[in-house]
Each structure stands twice: as C-alpha cells, then as structure tokens.
Amino acid sequence: MNSIIFFTLFLILLNFLLMMISNMIMIKSSKDREKNSPFECGFDPSWYTRSPFSMRFFLLAVIFLIFDIEIILLMPMVINILTSPSITYTSSSIIFLLILILGLLHEWNQGSLNWM
C-alpha cells in the first residue's frame, strides 16, 4: 500500500518537474531582442554606453547608505537603554553616537554633503 502511494507521488512530482522545465524553455525562447538589450531602464541605446557618471552623486549615495545603516543600528539601542539600566549599554551607545556625530561633522567640513 505504501509503495503505491509513494509511486503515485513520485509520478505527480515528476510530471510537475517536467511541466516546469518545459515552461522555462518556452519563456526563454519567447524573449525578443529589445528585452535582451542592456538599455532596459530608459536610456537611449543610440548614445555612447560609457557616459561619464557624476562622482559627487556617487559619494553622496555612499554617505547616505552609511548613515542609513547607522540609523538602523540606533533603533535597537534606544530600546536597550530604556529597558536595561546597565552602564555597558549606555556607554556603548554614547560611544557609538559620538562616532556617528564626529563622522557627520567630518563629512560636513570636507564639503561632501554640499550638492552644488
């Protein structure tokens, strides 16, 4: 009895696998030339592909990512400080905030936050 159930499930899974493989083959063959082009995000393909990229925009985006991750790290710190009276959480949070503020002041003094 168990072997019949096992064999039936095996056939169902094999059928499902074959259907998925045939579906993947059909999807790959139906792509047209424009979908495969590298300019799928709105750029005009008649322009030169290696156009110069704004370095100031790149630096501002990297700074944003760094400060965004630090803000995510700050959220649990606030909860830890409020729930536990331990001096280690408080001191580590103060050191982290001090490093964050000093980094922000350094970026401000270097002029990396100015767009124009």
Image (cartoon, rainbow, N blue to C red):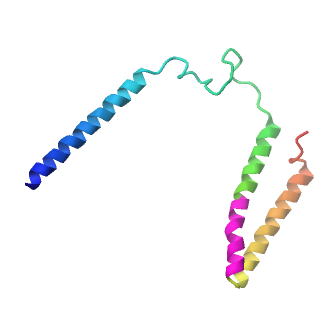
In this orientation, which residue lies closer to the viewer: 53 or 33?
33
Q: Which residue is drawn at 74% across and 24% down?
A: 51
Magenta segment = 70-83
Q: Residue at x 71, y 85 (%)?
A: 85
Q: Is residue 52 above or below residue 44?
A: below
* Figure quadrant of residue 2: bottom left
- State the quadrant of the N terminus: bottom left
* Figure quadrant of residue 71: bottom right
Q: Is residue 54 above or below residue 97?
A: above
Q: How many marks?
A: 0
Query: Where's residue 29, x and y in %?
Result: 40, 21
Query: Where's residue 14, x and y in %?
Result: 23, 39
Indicate yes or no whether the magenta region holds residue 108. Answer: no
Query: Where's residue 84, x and y in %?
Result: 67, 82
- Give the residue furthest to the top: 46
Q: Which residue is drawn at 88% across and 58% down?
A: 105
In this orientation, which residue lies closer to the viewer: 22 or 91?
22
Q: Which residue is drawn at 49% across and 18% down?
A: 32
Which secondary structure is most common in the magenta stretch?
helix
Q: Is residue 34 left or right of residue 80?
A: left
Q: In this view, does 100 lie to the left or right of 34?
A: right
- Give the residue furthest to the left: 1
In this orientation, which residue lies closer to the viewer: 15 or 38?
15
Query: Where's residue 65, x and y in %?
Result: 72, 50
Indicate yes or no whether the magenta region holds residue 73. Answer: yes
* Figure quadrant of residue 8: top left
- State the quadrant of the C terminus: top right
In this orientation, which residue lies closer to the viewer: 16 or 88?
16
